[in-house]
Amino acid sequence: MKISRHRLIGLPASALLITAVGCSSADDSADVAVPSTSPAVTKLCQNLDSELPRTVDGLSRNDPEPRSVLTAGWGSPVIILRCGVARPSKMVDPKVAEGRDPDAVAGGVNGVDWLQEERDGGYLFTSANRRAYVEVRVPEGQDSAGVLIDLAPAVKSAIPEGIAD
């Protein structure tokens, strides 16, 4: 009786799985909004684009559409980087800047400070104390520490310390 019950449950579940996999393939070629930036921030983001690694946490570059020097991606589901985003409202809180907020990544990662926010299906990290805000969306199940470690050298090199306008 248990076998037939599992078979009955398994059949609809497998049909659901096939449907879900079919729908999730759209996520593999992500579309993202390209930030609107000033010419100065665009230049910083162009510098960042030229410094970004070909792989992040072992995943190959897989840029989203539309293609832009302000966006980049790796893997599937895609880790998305957007450069020149607006300052998150939470960053106004001085506790975040001082690393005293639970959402602040205390001490940063390899010289880059980040605000961490939990979002549906993963985490959103936004760089802090840099002349342009860089946002990194990491899907659930992906090692966010590995992602930030791999991106830190490029962000540190291309986006100078300071406060973004």
Image: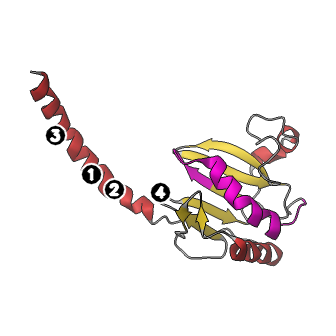
Q: Nearer the viewer, mark 3 or mark 2?
A: 3
N-terminal of the two: label 4 or label 3? 3
Q: Identify which amino acid the numbered label 3 is placed on.
A: Leu
**Whole-Å distance between the Cαs marked 2 and 1?**
6 Å
Task: Look at the numbered discs 3 and 2 and tell me whether their residues touch, using CB distance below 8 Å.
Answer: no
Q: Quadrant of residue 100?
A: top right
Residue 44's image quarter? bottom right
The reply to whether residue 33 is in sight is: no
Q: Is residue 146 left or right of residue 121?
A: right
Q: Position of residue 116 (x, y in %)?
A: 70, 44
- For badge 1, the amino acid type reads Thr
Q: Measure the alpha-carbon separation of dots 3 and 2.
A: 19 Å
Among numbered discs 4 and 1, the one appearing first in the sequence: 1
Q: Nearer the viewer, mark 3 or mark 1?
A: 3
The answer to whether the residue labelled 4 contacts the one labelled 3, judged by CB atoms less than 8 Å apart, is: no
Q: Give the residue number, with chain letter if any, for mark 1.
A: 19
Residue 11's mark? Answer: 3
Residue located beneath label 4 in the image: 77
Alpha carbon distance from label 3 to label 1? 12 Å
2 and 1 marks in contact (CB < 8 Å): yes
Q: Quadrant of the C terminus?
A: bottom right
Q: Residues within 10 Å of mark 3 (few under 14, many from 20)?
A: few
Tell me the magenta residue range.
137-162
Residue drawn at point x = 80 percent, y = 70 percent: 158
Q: Are marks 4 and 1 in contact (CB under 8 Å)?
A: no
Say if 91 sits above or below 59 in the image. above
Sooner in the amino-acid sequence: mark 4 or mark 2: 2
Is 134 left or right of 77, judged from the image as shown? Answer: right
* Residue 40 sits inside the magenta stretch: no
Which element carries disc 4, helix, strand or loop? Answer: loop
Crowd band around label 2 with a 10 angstrom C-alpha radius: few (<14), some (14–19), many (20+): few
